[in-house]
């Protein structure tokens, strides 16, 4: 391919060729405004070349093998010394039950073996490598494949797989789905009951025992601590809700006595508010959720308010502390204010905040404001920017796999009866509506990272010293912004070049058009007028597709897989009293064990697949991605900056609870899982 160029600088013949290319792309990338995600301009179908790469599917298949193996390890306890099936008490199992259990185990083994054979063919080795612990990318096990792909066209590799096994890559997704469905079948549920993975838990150990072959996440030993509860707001799966406030407000009437019981007699609400040390997590957005059932148990979700504070300057530790919780937006006798001195009631109130945070995370921070927002750019870019446009060239690697994973999510994950419907607290209709509304209200210009942090009042490290997400994300934003600015400078010599780029102006128009992507508050009064703004916008796109998605996606595996730490639904309403609750009360609110197992499976799958790496544009392709020699030096500088960022974050992690999701080596280029 010739070097990228701006349309207004091409010859008339070249301009006509670009128009022809765009006309063809617009027939390929077609909007569907009539889905359950309407009125968002999501893709009608996944164009050829935008499907999952074999290496990514292989990584997902590896995780599923481990998930099935995890259940089978528990099921092995039913096998007696003579090989016959026995009850958990050791008695011989009746013939009918034994045949049913043997049938489901055989089915699981057959599917397990089929995936193993496919992986063996893809990997080229007779045995699997050891299972990596959580946080380590399973894709690392496929480095041998990555090297092969560096010298072979991807379609050729797919052909090798098909020829070897007559088993197309796209069928792996069906096997993954069928394996999970088998565990949820009537016989699968019987198996789960027999091995103690069904029904209400009697102790935390019941949830711990679901981790048979997986390493138990570290969060399991500290999730009940108030320090961990506060840490979740600044370094958990959803570090995006906390806002600085001057006071809790009339709808959350925390008293000075309640505040001082936590923060000490020498502090006060007024001084904390004045000094910028008071923070609120407000889940009002969840008020529109309609509680669902799973499948015959009522689920509950609140729209709570949680108050936090930072100790005054000079204190030995200035980490965020939880002060009070109100499990409803309106105060009253039915929604009292809970504080840490309330014992069991406080623990239950924290659980309801975690349920709210999990639903906010999955529907807004994750699905809505990474997956669906980036889909808008993944659609408008090939439709409005010719393949040789420098912005198209820059952004395309950051869209790899996005349309495919979003299409799969719409078809299965967020479909009626799917995992979201089963696990999350709301009905699937209200949950989907909340995700869509989060995109329709998404103000692009206000979501640029430095702007968003300032808008929430969490940008000041003196007022809020411990905020790992903010501190690490800003490093990445800066590195990406420098790379984007230097890249654009190769092609745009002035703001006039931006203003005269009619493809770019068509791109921004489609991104904001109701008949296109319907994004809000994007551009400079509906246009792009300056190179500086274009740099900010493209930085935001790349940051969202890579670092932001990593921040909200990968904690699913090592935080959200342990259900008591972050349950996705409550199974009893929030308490209306602050005293008198028995210690067993919390198990009435936690999800039943079969729901916890489903949550473990889904979270491990979504948070356990790593494919591609930020800044490594040549990974898994033959030759160099950027053919313009002028790009080489800025790209190498970007890669060095990412290595320096890795070192800085590594040193920070020696002084804090390690925060690993924004290590550049752990960040994929695009939203592909």
Image (cartoon, grey):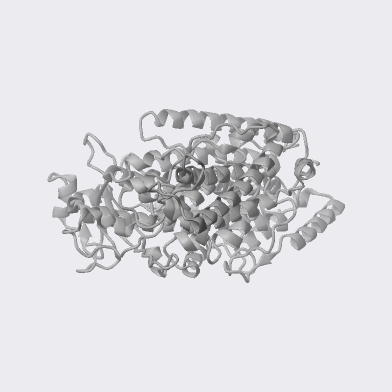
Residue 299, quarter of the rendered image:
bottom left
Residue depicted at 64% across the width and 35% down the height: 142
Count the marks: 0
Going by the picture, which residue comes out furthest to the right? 13
Indicate left or right for 388 with 341 as reference: right
Residue 118, quarter of the rendered image:
top right
Q: Quadrant of the N terminus?
A: top right
Between 300 and 466, the residue placed more toward the observer is 300
Between 53 and 319, the residue placed more toward the observer is 53
Residue depicted at 75% across the width and 49% down the height: 387
- The location of residue 224, given as percent across then percent down, is 29, 46
Residue 377 makes an appearance in the image: yes
- The location of residue 673, given as percent across then percent down, is 58, 49
Between 371 and 565, the residue placed more toward the observer is 565
Q: Is residue 27 above or below residue 171?
A: below
Q: Is residue 548 above or below residue 369?
A: above
- The location of residue 130, given as percent across then percent down, is 55, 32
Between 67 and 331, the residue placed more toward the observer is 67
Indicate left or right for 343 with 117 as reference: left
- The location of residue 32, given as percent across then percent down, is 66, 67
Residue 184 makes an appearance in the image: no
Indicate left or right for 527 with 559 as reference: right
Indicate left or right for 8 with 215 as reference: right
Residue depicted at 54% across the width and 55% down the height: 99
């Amino acid at each position: 391919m010739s070097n990228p160029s701006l349309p207004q600088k091409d010859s008339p013949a070249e301009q006509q060729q670009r128009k022809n290319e765009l006309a063809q792309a617009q027939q390929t990338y077609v909007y569907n405004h009539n889905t359950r995600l309407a009125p968002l301009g999501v893709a009608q179908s996944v164009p050829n070349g935008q499907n999952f790469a074999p290496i990514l599917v292989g990584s997902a298949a590896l995780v599923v093998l481990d998930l099935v193996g995890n259940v089978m390890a528990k099921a092995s306890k039913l096998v007696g010394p003579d090989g016959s099936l026995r009850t958990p008490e050791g008695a011989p199992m009746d013939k009918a039950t034994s045949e049913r259990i043997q049938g489901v185990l055989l089915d699981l083994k057959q599917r397990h073996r089929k995936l193993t054979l496919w992986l063996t063919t893809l990997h080229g080795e007779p045995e699997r490598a050891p299972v990596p612990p959580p946080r380590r990318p399973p894709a690392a096990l496929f480095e041998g494949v990555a090297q092969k792909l560096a010298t072979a066209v991807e379609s050729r590799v797919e052909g090798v797989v098909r020829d070897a096994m007559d088993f197309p890559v796209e069928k792996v997704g069906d096997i993954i789905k069928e394996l999970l469905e088998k565990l949820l079948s009537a016989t699968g549920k019987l198996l789960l009951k027999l091995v103690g993975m069904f029904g209400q838990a009697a102790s935390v150990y019941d949830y711990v025992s679901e981790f048979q072959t997986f390493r138990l996440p570290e969060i399991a030993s500290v999730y009940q601590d108030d320090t961990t509860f506060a840490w979740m707001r600044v370094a958990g799966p959803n570090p995006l809700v906390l806002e600085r406030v001057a006071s809790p407000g009339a709808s959350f009437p925390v008293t000075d006595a309640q505040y001082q019981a936590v923060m000490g007699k020498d502090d006060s609400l007024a001084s904390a508010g004045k000094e910028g040390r008071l923070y609120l997590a407000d889940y009002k957005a969840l008020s529109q959720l309609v509680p669902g059932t799973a499948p015959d148990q009522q689920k509950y979700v609140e729209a709570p308010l949680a108050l936090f504070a930072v100790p005054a300057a000079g204190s030995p530790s200035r980490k965020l502390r939880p002060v009070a919780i109100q499990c409803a937006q309106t105060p009253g006798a039915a929604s009292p204010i809970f504080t840490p001195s309330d014992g069991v009631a406080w623990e239950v109130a924290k659980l309801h905040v975690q349920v709210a945070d999990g639903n906010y995370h999955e529907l807004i921070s994750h699905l809505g404001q990474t997956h669906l927002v980036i889909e808008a750019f993944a659609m408008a870019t090939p439709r409005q920017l010719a393949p040789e446009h420098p912005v198209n060239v820059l952004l395309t690697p950051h869209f790899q796999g996005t349309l495919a994973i979003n299409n799969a999510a719409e078809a299965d994950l967020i479909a009626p009866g799917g995992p979201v419907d089963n696990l999350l607290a709301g009905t699937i209709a209200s949950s989907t509506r909340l995700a869509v509304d989060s995109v329709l209200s998404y103000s692009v210009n206000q979501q640029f990272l430095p702007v968003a942090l300032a808008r929430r009042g969490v940008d000041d490290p003196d007022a809020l010293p411990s905020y790992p997400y903010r501190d690490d994300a800003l490093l990445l934003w800066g590195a990406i912004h420098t790379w984007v600015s230097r890249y654009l400078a190769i092609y745009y010599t002035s703001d006039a070049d931006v203003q005269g780029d009619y493809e770019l102006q068509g791109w921004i128009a489609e991104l904001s058009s109701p008949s296109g992507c319907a994004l809000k508050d994007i551009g400079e009064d509906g246009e792009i007028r300056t190179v500086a703004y274009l740099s900010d916008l493209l930085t935001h796109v790349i940051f969202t597709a890579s670092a932001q998605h990593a921040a909200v996606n990968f904690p699913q595996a090592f935080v959200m897989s342990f259900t008591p730490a972050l349950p996705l639904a409550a199974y009893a309403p929030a308490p209306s009293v602050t005293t008198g609750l028995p210690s067993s009360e919390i198990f009435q609110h936690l999800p039943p064990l079969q729901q916890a197992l489903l949550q473990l499976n889904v979270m491990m799958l979504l948070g356990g697949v790593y494919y591609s790496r930020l800044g490594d544009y040549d990974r898994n392709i033959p030759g160099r991605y950027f053919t313009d020699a002028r790009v080489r030096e800025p790209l190498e500088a970007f890669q060095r900056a990412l290595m320096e960022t890795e070192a800085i974050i590594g040193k920070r992690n020696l002084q804090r609870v390690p925060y690993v999701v924004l290590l550049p080596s752990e960040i994929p280029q695009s939203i592909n899982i």
